[in-house]
Image (cartoon, rainbow, N blue to C red):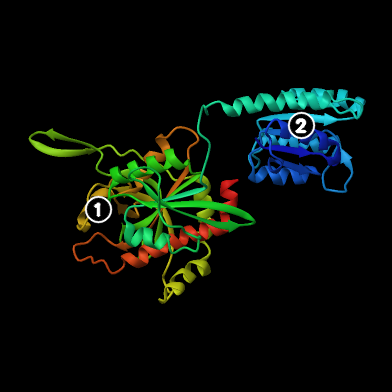
């Protein structure tokens, strides 16, 4: 159980903290915040079970205390999106008149006020009763799962795709089993003082089915906030260049539909179902797309001429169940979406797993580097760079915007 005490008089909680310890609440799980902004910073990165909120709180440490600062924080918790909402909130004040004036405001949000007193322990007994209630709730089996790891990366192949993800400087560990068939590498990075946890794995084989099954297992066992795929794809010539990285948005199964017969002729009737990448991730990648210097550095770090490499392209990507080596097939797929920029075998499977899971659902996105144009004369010489570039764009996204995406 985690408790946040937002009060500029922390000494009056010493006995209460001792009594909470008798209930099993460890001291390390109790955070003291002397101002509204300190409390706000704590709730950006931590989910608390109970918030004890001084009704008369300064905005900054050593500042002037005012009920407006506490009420603004209360409003932000209910109306905003940047803070993690506590399970329960209790207002605390020793001012009798302030109790009455603030009671209606707290009641409008269904929270109550406890009147602090140095002369008796009734106020702390009410807090302890609330803590006991929360502890009983926490002891029950979870009605629904909570988020776990911050970022999970699923690749279609161990090499070169997972290999390049594991070359990101994210403190990777040796693989560990999640179950009998799923192994992951754990890692982490630090962004803006926050530790972002990562897990990476590869599907047992290429294709939408294998990716969907591996993604579902990762979601159920790790509950990631962000679910990403890095790897390689075929590009649509004249829309993208070799070495470009594509954010698949939207993705669909280009082989979905049925074959019908009309006047003796067999014809395929298409029925594409499109799924989209995370809107938040897309907006941040749009910012990276305009930073040509950072993208050119990806190529320079690989040891090649940066002219023309690497661009970040955001657009439709079609998934199929077979490797394409016929440029003419891409022309047929373009009939399903005239803005098509890439074709591969997995993106729709990952999006389908993320969109169909129970709450909380991860923000899903697929980044793939262009290694060929699905033509008969294609070779594999660009696969390593394409896998490298997609992983590096993921690294750029997380280093710049990871903390914001997770908040």
> Left or right: 53 with respect to 252?
right
> In this orientation, which residue lies closer to the viewer: 389 or 222?
222
- Residue at coordinates 33% horizontally, 54% vertically from top-left? 342
Q: Position of residue 313 (x, y in %)?
A: 42, 58
Can you tell which mark lies on residue 262?
A: none
Residue under circle 1? 331
Tally of numbered discs:
2
Residue under circle 2? 19
> In this orientation, which residue lies closer to the viewer: 391 or 249?
391
Query: Of circles 2 and 1, which is in front?
Result: 2
> In this orientation, which residue lies closer to the viewer: 51 or 40?
51
239 to 260, vertically: above or below: below
* Circle 2 SS class: helix
Q: Is residue 71 visible?
A: no
Q: Residues within 10 Å of mark 1 (few under 14, many from 20)?
A: few
> In this orientation, which residue lies closer to the viewer: 160 or 322?
160
Quadrant for residue 216, please give it: top left
* Circle 1 SS class: helix
Quadrant for residue 66, please give it: top right
68 to 280, vertically: above or below: above
Q: Position of residue 183 (x, y in %)?
A: 38, 49
The quarter of the image holding the N terminus is top right
Sequence order check, earlier mark of 2 and 1: 2
């Amino acid at each position: 159980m985690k408790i946040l005490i937002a009060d500029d008089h922390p000494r009056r909680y010493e006995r209460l903290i001792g009594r909470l310890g008798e209930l099993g609440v460890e001291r390390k799980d109790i955070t003291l915040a002397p101002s509204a902004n300190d409390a706000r910073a704590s709730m950006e990165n931590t989910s608390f079970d109970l918030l004890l909120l001084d009704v008369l709180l300064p905005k900054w440490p050593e500042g002037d205390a005012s009920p407006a600062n506490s009420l603004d924080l209360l409003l932000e918790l209910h109306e905003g999106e940047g803070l993690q909402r506590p399970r329960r909130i209790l207002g605390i004040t020793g001012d009798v008149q302030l109790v009455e004036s603030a009671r209606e405001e707290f009641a409008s949000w269904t929270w109550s006020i406890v009147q602090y007193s140095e002369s008796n322990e009734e106020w702390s007994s009410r807090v302890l009763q609330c803590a006991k209630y929360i502890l009983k709730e926490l002891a029950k089996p979870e009605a629904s799962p909570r988020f776990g790891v911050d970022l999970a990366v699923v690749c279609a192949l161990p090499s070169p795709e997972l290999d390049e993800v594991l070359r990101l400087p994210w403190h990777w560990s040796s693989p560990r089993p999640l179950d009998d068939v799923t192994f992951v590498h754990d890692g982490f990075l630090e962004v803006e003082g926050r530790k972002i946890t990562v897990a990476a794995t590869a599907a047992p084989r290429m294709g939408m089915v294998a990716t969907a099954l591996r993604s579902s297992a990762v979601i159920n066992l790790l509950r990631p906030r962000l679910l990403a795929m890095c790897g390689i794809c075929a590009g649509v010539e004249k829309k993208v260049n070799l070495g470009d990285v594509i954010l698949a948005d939207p993705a669909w199964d280009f082989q979905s539909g049925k074959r019908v017969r009309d006047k003796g002729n067999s014809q395929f009737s298409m029925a594409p179902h499109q799924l989209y990448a995370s809107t938040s991730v897309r907006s941040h990648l749009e910012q990276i797309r305009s930073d040509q210097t950072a993208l050119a550095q990806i190529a320079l770090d690989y040891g090649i001429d940066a002219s023309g490499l690497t661009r970040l392209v955001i657009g439709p990507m079609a998934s199929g169940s077979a490797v394409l080596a016929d440029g003419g097939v891409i022309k047929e797929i373009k009939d399903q979406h005239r803005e098509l920029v890439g074709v591969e075998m997995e993106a729709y499977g990952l999006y389908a797993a993320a969109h169909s899971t129970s709450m909380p659902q991860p923000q899903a996105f697929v980044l793939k580097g262009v290694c060929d144009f699905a033509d008969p004369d294609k070779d594999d010489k660009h696969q390593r760079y394409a896998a490298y570039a997609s992983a590096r764009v993921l690294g750029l996204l997380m280093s710049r915007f990871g903390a914001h995406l997770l908040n």
